[in-house]
Image: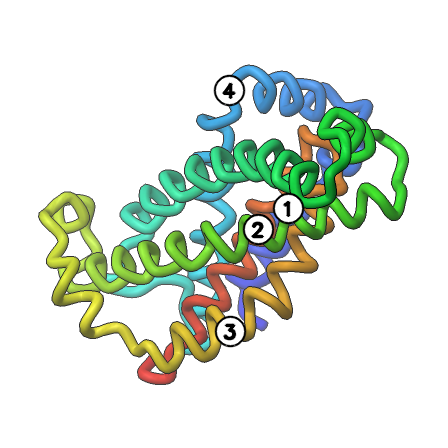
Amino acid sequence: MKKQDWLLIIGVIIVLTPFFIPATVFFAWFNNATSAHPFIMAFFKFAILATLGEMLALRIRKGVYTEKGFGVLPRMMVWGFLGMCIAMAMMIFKVGTPFFMSKVLSCDYASLMDVFNASAFSWGKLGIAFCVSVAMNTIFAPVMMTFHKCTDIHIAQTGGTVAGLLKPMPTKQILGSINWEVQWGVVFKKTIPLFWYPAHTITFILPPNLQVLFAALLGVALGLILALANPQK
């Protein structure tokens, strides 16, 4: 391991340690900020953590964390935007999925939400969390992942600059250039059911103030998966 790897590890430990010590001032500030500004916080969580995942993927492939044309800042902007979209999707599916379940199962919606929002773990809460995860990852995730893939290609084609990111994206051309054997056969068919279904089930069991943070930490894994699932790199 190189010096830069040790510096990254130490930096990650320093940043994440306060989240495991609830009595700290930082933890209280984090909870208050997440409650008052959920979308702003989601922007920065994903901008930092998911971009870090892509940088780690580059480190694995080429031995460096960034290179000319990689576009760290544009990638952070894209991930920040996607982070806000993910936060919105989590809000929608946490409410909408139990409502759908109440209609299908002919049961009381309020009772389902009481089970789902209970602080104590139960098999009922696990089942509802799994259904929420399946619904969100089946309906929302493929669209989000495809959009990210398009922006990833667009950033590479425009030199990895912020100005390049802001140029009109030739969506039709980019969609045609995507390796759909990988995008469909690996990213959609394998990672969504085998990784994201169980991973986000855990997310929805956690306390609400930690759910987006955990999803952002999973964004590190998402960045690695999407970046490494390309045989041309």
Q: Of the residues tagged 4 and 1, which is closer to the observer?
A: 1
139 is higher (above) or lower (below) than 206: below
Estimate the x, y position of residue 3 in percent, counting from the top left. Answer: 54, 64
- Gap between marks 1 and 2, in whole Å? 5 Å
Residue at 29% across, 60% down: 152
Q: Quadrant of the N terminus?
A: bottom right
> Whole-Å distance between the Cαs marked 3 and 1?
18 Å
User: Disc 1 residue type?
Assistant: Val
| Residue closer to the observer: 130 or 18 | 130
Q: Does 219 sit above or below residue 46?
A: below
Q: Residue at x 49, y 65 (%)?
A: 224
Q: Earlier in the sequence, mark 4 or mark 1?
A: 4
**Pointer 4: what residue?**
37
* 1 and 2 marks in contact (CB < 8 Å): yes
Say the numbered circle drawn on residue 132: 1
Q: Which element carries disc 3, helix, strand or loop?
A: helix
Q: Is residue 15 visible?
A: no
Amino acid type at image mark 4? His
Question: Badge 4 local density, few (<14 within 10 Å), some, or many (20+)?
Answer: few
Q: Residue at x 58, y 24 (%)?
A: 34
- Residue 146: % across, % down: 34, 60
Q: How much space separates mark 2 and mark 4, taking CA atoms?
A: 25 Å
Q: Nearer the viewer, mark 2 or mark 4?
A: 2
Residue type, label 3: Lys
Residue 59 occupies quadrant: bottom left
Which mark is in front, 3 or 2?
A: 2
The residue at which mark 2 appears reads as: 135
**Mark 2 or 4, nearer chain start:** 4
Q: Using a 10 Å C-alpha cutoff, classify the residue at mark 2 as few (fewer than 14 neighbours), some (14 to 19) or many (20 or more).
A: some
Residue at numbered disc 3: 189
